[in-house]
Image (cartoon, rainbow, N blue to C red):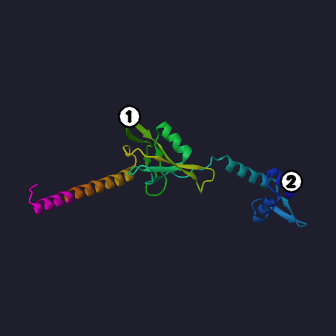
Amino acid sequence: MHTTAAAAQAGVTVATIRTWCRKGVVAAVKAAGRWVVDAASLARRIEIGARRMAQPAALPPLVITSKTSIPGVLGIVGSADALAAAFAAGAPVTLGGTKVAGEQVYLGHARTVYDDGLSVQVQGFDSERGEHTDFPGIACAVYLVDMNRLDAAPTIKATVDKAHARSLARAAATEQTAAAEAARVARNIGYDC
């Protein structure tokens, strides 16, 4: 069949058919300066294209971030729809990336609120990140991690525990320095602590 008929059958432009012919994507021969496309080869190409279109759109991997609106609380960056669904269902999400690939975390940071009494609010959504550059049409967001449920994320848990231990050590060192300074001042002015 000639390129115009092939383009109509495949739902592409004549220029695309000519490119496919030149690159060998479809079997074709040139006769009298025009491409003649093999119908069976074109049918296989159309089928391949249909299978690719039928596959669900890939989502960006879920990655961890420390850049959230709440200091010390981690977040997950990924498809806004996927994260919203996981948060609403209370289901864990599986992380991609390299260092923590395969680890699972739950979404939602619980905080105590003192407004006309005592209540606990669970915040999932943290911020929007816009459309993903590598996945057009996929809106990304940051959701906060439940820092109390890191059992299925051993690498993250170990990192959080180390950071917490360093923070406690710095606080203890600051208290010791302050106590030593207070004792020194008291000795200099004649008071005993």
Judge by depth and name the residue closer to the eye, 33 or 92: 92
For mark 2, give the secondary structure.
helix
| Amino acid at the residue labelled 2 | Ala
Residue in view at x 62 percent, y 48 percent: 57
Say above or below: 59 vs 21.
Answer: above
Looking at the figure, which quarter contains the C terminus?
bottom left
Judge by depth and name the residue closer to the eye, 45 or 169: 169
Task: Say whether residue 49 is left or right of residue 139.
Answer: right
Residue in view at x 9 percent, y 57 percent: 191
Alpha carbon separation for disc pair 2 and 1 = 69 Å
Check whether the beta carbons of the residues at disc 2 and disc 1 lie within 8 A of each other.
Answer: no
Labels 2 and 1: the sequence-earlier one: 2
Task: Say whether residue 70 is left or right of residue 31.
Answer: left
- Location of residue 94 in the rendering, given as x and y in whole percent from the top left corner: 47, 47
Closest to the camera, between mark 2 and mark 1, is 1
Which residue was labeled with disc 2?
A: 5
| Amino acid at the residue labelled 1 | Ser
Dot label at residue 119: 1
User: Is 190 one of the magenta-colored residues?
Assistant: yes
Say above or below: 42 vs 117.
Answer: below
- Location of residue 110 in the rendering, given as x and y in whole percent from the top left corner: 39, 40
Task: Say whether residue 65 is left or right of residue 27.
Answer: left
Which range is magenta? 177-193
Q: Quadrant of residue 173?
A: bottom left
Looking at the figure, which quarter contains the N terminus?
bottom right
Most common secondary structure along the magenta stretch: helix
User: Is 133 one of the magenta-colored residues?
Assistant: no
User: Most extreme residue toward the bottom, as rendered?
Assistant: 33
